[in-house]
Image: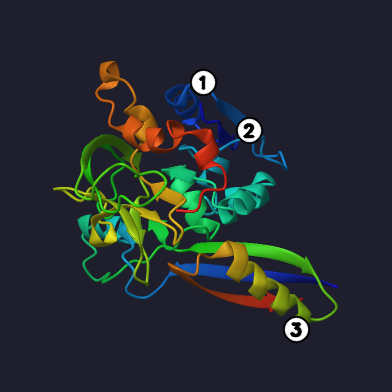
Amino acid sequence: MSRCAVVVFPGSNCDQDALWAWGEGAVPVWHQESRLPDVDAVILPGGFAYGDYLRAGALARFSPIMADVRRVAADGMPVLGICNGFQVLCEAGLLPGALAKNAGIAFRCQSVEVEVADGDTAWTRGMAPGTRLRLPIAHGEGRYWSPDAVRVAFRYVGENPNGSMDAIAGVRNAAGNVVGLMPHPERAAASVLGGCDGLRILGAVRDRPAVALKGARA
Amino acid sequence: MTFTADVRVHFKPGTLDPQGQAVLRAVHSMGLQAVADVRVGKSVRLQVEAPDAKAAGALVERLCREILANPVLEDYTFEVHA
């Protein structure tokens, strides 16, 4: 079973969901730690790190653990930013662009359909482009914008819930090991909770042999 | 010596400002159609120690770039005074 660190910032509120969805091998890591434990993947969970003070993700990127997250990301370790974690990755410069307030002002909390735009990332491996997933969203600042062309990992299908550029729901870095998305795969991890599609994203990393995963460059 | 810096952060021109638009609609519902646009930004006041105003300005410039504003979405202006 692959091991995964779930970074807990003050104000994270989806860390327990991510730990539960990953299951055995998932460990919480407090943001004040300077080193990640021996893991195969890192998740920055959803929530409101530092209360979204200043801007969503703006202060979290200065947490001590982020230096080590940068290091393992540069080494090719799979890193997933979910919702607020996606905002943190953008603020930290590990992913391009930024997340602005939803175009319609409203906090959107609903189920959406997304399409895998790129199956060649650590977190979408095994899914062909065009694969559709039903995932929950819950955010007020999910309008993705970048002045430059970006590598899209996920797009909203049908209604664009927040006015994102090009209906972008998630992006990847050049190497494909770092992915961020606004929808919550960890909240779609049991049929009794409305669906299991999120496990296809988490499972793309979790269910790979650890030996092949370590130091993998996508 | 201690300098006071007043920083203003605002969305880049052309960037959608849903908060400003919501305020504008409320203003119009007050019957004040004379208000043509509203943009909501942030104001940050800093006290900084520096040998002179130029050094204080350089420090504030760095803070604006690296933490106070997100260069993808926002512009900033600031004034430094003793």
- Within 10 Å of the Cα at label 1, are there few (<14), some (14-19), or many (20+) other Cα atoms? few
Q: Which mark is residue A162?
A: none
Residue B67: image quadrant is bottom right
Q: Which residue does the image show at 37% across and 72% down from the upper left? A: A148
Q: Quadrant of residue A34?
A: top right
Question: Which amino acid type corresponds to the residue marked 3 in the rendered image?
Answer: Lys
- For image coordinates 27% across by 43% down, the residue present is A127
x, y percent for residue A50 = 57, 42
Q: Secondary structure at mark 2?
A: strand
The answer to which of B30 and B71 lies nearer the viewer is: B71
Depicted A92 relative to depicted B5: above or below? above
Say if labels 2 and 3 share a chain: no
Amino acid type, label 2: Val
Q: Which residue is mark 2?
A: A29
Is the C-beta separation of discs 2 and 1 under 8 Å?
no
- Bin the neighbour count of mark 2 within 10 Å (Cα to Cα): few under 14, some 14-19, many 20 and up: many
| C-alpha distance separating marks 2 and 3 | 42 Å
Q: Which mark is residue B54?
A: 3
Tags 2 and 1 both on a single chain: yes
